[in-house]
Image (tube, rainbow, N blue to C red):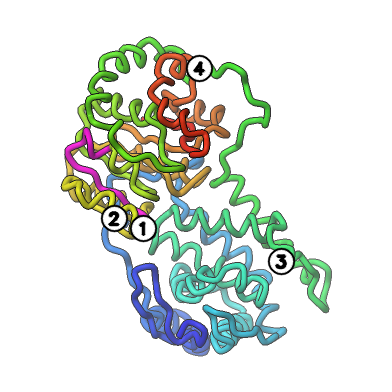
Amino acid sequence: QASSGSCHRDRAGLCNAAPMSALAGLLPLSMAAAVSVAVAQSGIRQRQGRRPSNVRPRCCDPRSVATWAPLLAACFLLGAPLVGAANAACPATATVSAEDWQAASQALADLGATGAPPPWPEWGRAWLQLGQQVRLGLEENLVACPEGAVTALLHSVGALDEAEGEMAALELVKMLHHLVASGGLPALGVKPQDGGEPWRQQWLLTAASLIRFAYLKWVQVPQDSSSKEATLPPIMPALQAHNSFVFKQTVGDFVRTGVYDLELTENSVLFSEAFAFMAFCRMHEVDYVLESGVYKGVSTEVWSLFAKDVSAVDIFISNEANQRLSRRSNVRLFEGDGRALLPQLLTEQPGRKAAIFIDGPKGELAIRLALSLREHPQVAFVAIHDMAPYRQELGKLGAFFLSDESWYQEAYGHLDAPFKARPDMPAGGTMAFLS
């Protein structure tokens, strides 16, 4: 019933049938009491154990997203009353009903009539359900109702950080930057609204400017220039001799794991990358591996050859991965968001040293996740796949080894012989290691 807006299914498949009309009654009562009613009716559920209390999120700024997320909503509030005043009807979409759009618009009109600021953070929590529905069909909702979609998302981003974690809020900012601030959704555009002074007409451009600032400040990781160096030096030259010694002590054990008996598949890790991961696990005496991004389960199976236990997470576990890993008794598979599940899996086994491999999310969100996870006292190191475009920035962030370093490929590139014999099978990607 998603199209009617009467049933919102979250990522766990749970149905939340609370009507968004709760927002419509948010302001006519006394502000604080009304928000309490709306929060209760909206079915907001706090996720238990979301972030261990002893872990400090680490991104470009040491503060949590919860610190700056309300700023987005507060700044956007300058344009919000215009939505209610215009009272323009937004059409129903696959995830938001017309009634839900109207209820949210009325809540904004009522807020404008009071002349008072909203009660933070309850105001954001009351918007969370609508924000989640908008995210489920983000592009469609931005086109169908740009005012309502951007309003719901920015008002609820602080509550999103609280309910689903910092990485979910960062992902939302990145998507809004791409679709709204960078022209990734041409059908949306940044068009002036009818009536009023120019700064009132250009409310979406104002929101886009703030979104862009948040993205550049807290999400973006600059990529290297497009020119590719012929020779890739060590990311940390002082450690080359040390890393070389570690690899020499481990390469025989890697070959004897049986890794060359595994079936090859496309887009998997190269054996030279897997070998480096194993070598650092041995160096740190790690016997527990956590993985985010399973795909067909090849890397998961490789870790199972030398680790005592492997826990792997993906939004969707494919049949091929299930079949491949069913014979590995030391592997546990979890369907869900690795950004939320990995910290929980770590806390299940306190005191146990672990290594983490991230192959999803990708790009800068993977780096942000790695920077957060490496702060956990149990984590010996974090490895991230497909990091070639970020070499320079990774060096600044403390990466101690990259699998494409020229000296390493000269010494251990031969481990990838089975893949080199299959040019029709693309595989591998620079693996970066941080601790």
Q: Give the quarter of the figure containing the C terminus.
A: top left
Query: Which one is earlier in the sequence, the residue at label 1 or at label 4?
Result: 1
| Residue matched to label 4 | 406
Is label 1 in contact with label 3 (beta carbons under 8 Å)?
no
**Residue in the foreground of this view, choosing between 232 and 77:** 232
Gap in angstroms between the C-alphas marked 2 and 3: 45 Å
Gap in angstroms between the C-alphas marked 1 and 2: 6 Å
Residue 272 position, x and y percent, is 39, 26
Tell me the element at label 2.
helix
| Residue matched to label 3 | 204
Question: Is residue 230 among the parts visible in the rendering?
Answer: yes
Question: Where is residue 269, by image quadrant?
Answer: top left
Crowdedness of circle 2 by 10 Å Cα count: few (<14), some, many (20+)? few
Q: Left or right: 431 with respect to 202?
A: left
Query: Which amino acid is tagged 1?
Result: Ser
Query: Which amino acid is tagged 4?
Result: Ser
Is label 1 in contact with label 2 (beta carbons under 8 Å)?
yes
What's the magenta region?
303-316
| Residue matched to label 1 | 318
| Residue matched to label 2 | 322
Residue drawn where x is 17% and y is 45% of the image = 330
